Amino acid sequence: MNTATIEALWRFPIKSFQGEKLDQVEFDNHGILGDRAYALIDKETGKVVSAKSVKLFPDLLMCSAFYLKEPSWSEEIPSVQITLANGTSVNSDSKDIDQILSDFFGRDVTLATVAPENFTIDQYHPDLANLDPAGNRNISIEQKLGSALFKDMGVDSPLPPGSFMDVFPVSLMTTSTLEYMHELRPETNFDIRRFRMNVVVKTTDSGFVENEWVGKT
């Protein structure tokens, strides 16, 4: 019989940056308080900057951010301290924040707290057969996310307008899945931080155990 306990809790103040490992979090039906509250927007394309395709932003995942004070449901989202991959540290409240980020990434970006109505990213599809039903392979395509995706699908969105979440309010992964991937590809470094999951659950069964949880409570 599989048993499960919480292994780790993560909050990511800036979308696609490294985040904070926490002992506890607050959440509601829109997700964890303060998670993905900020994101970079490419001013040239209007797209939200995402680690799903880092060709234009190769150092994205090497940057990190943490809150200078704990977020509150009753207050505006607080500022964050940002550490770039080159060691530069800057507060999100700095009047030069957009210029500093633009200089580092080599593209004109702005740090935003509200996703565009037409929330779109560049998403890379690797050259692997049967991975994408649409047949996209070794190419980056435009992909709508957040409430914009559900609006296009004509269904109710689990995310409010303006949210930077991709599809659902909270992301989860088990240690069983991580261990199974190591078994399948022992030469690959499956560092849990690469997946930027909110909740890491320690499980005892083997394989992709999350698949068995779909539709259950």
Image (cartoon, rainbow, N blue to C red):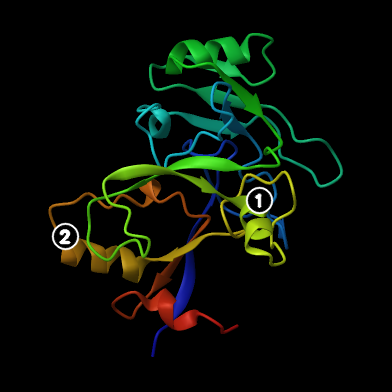
- Does 76 sit left or right of 43 as displayed? right
Report which residue position mark 1 lands on: 148
**Extreme right residue here?**
74
Which amino acid, by three-letter code, is at mark 2?
Arg
Name the residue: 49% across, 81% down.
213
**Extreme bottom residue here?**
1
Q: Quadrant of residue 76?
A: top right
* Closest to the observer, 83 or 118: 118
Name the residue: 21% across, 61% down.
182
- Does 85 sit left or right of 31 as displayed? left
Say whether disc 2 or disc 1 marks the residue closer to the N-terminus: 1
* Closest to the observer, 38 or 12: 38
Name the residue: 59% across, 29% down.
46
Name the residue: 35% across, 78% down.
204
Quadrant for the C terminus, please: bottom right
Q: Position of residue 202 (x, y in %)?
A: 41, 69
Q: Residues within 10 Å of mark 1 (few under 14, many from 20)?
A: many
User: What secondary structure is marked by label 2?
Assistant: loop
Which amino acid, by three-letter code, is at mark 1?
Ala
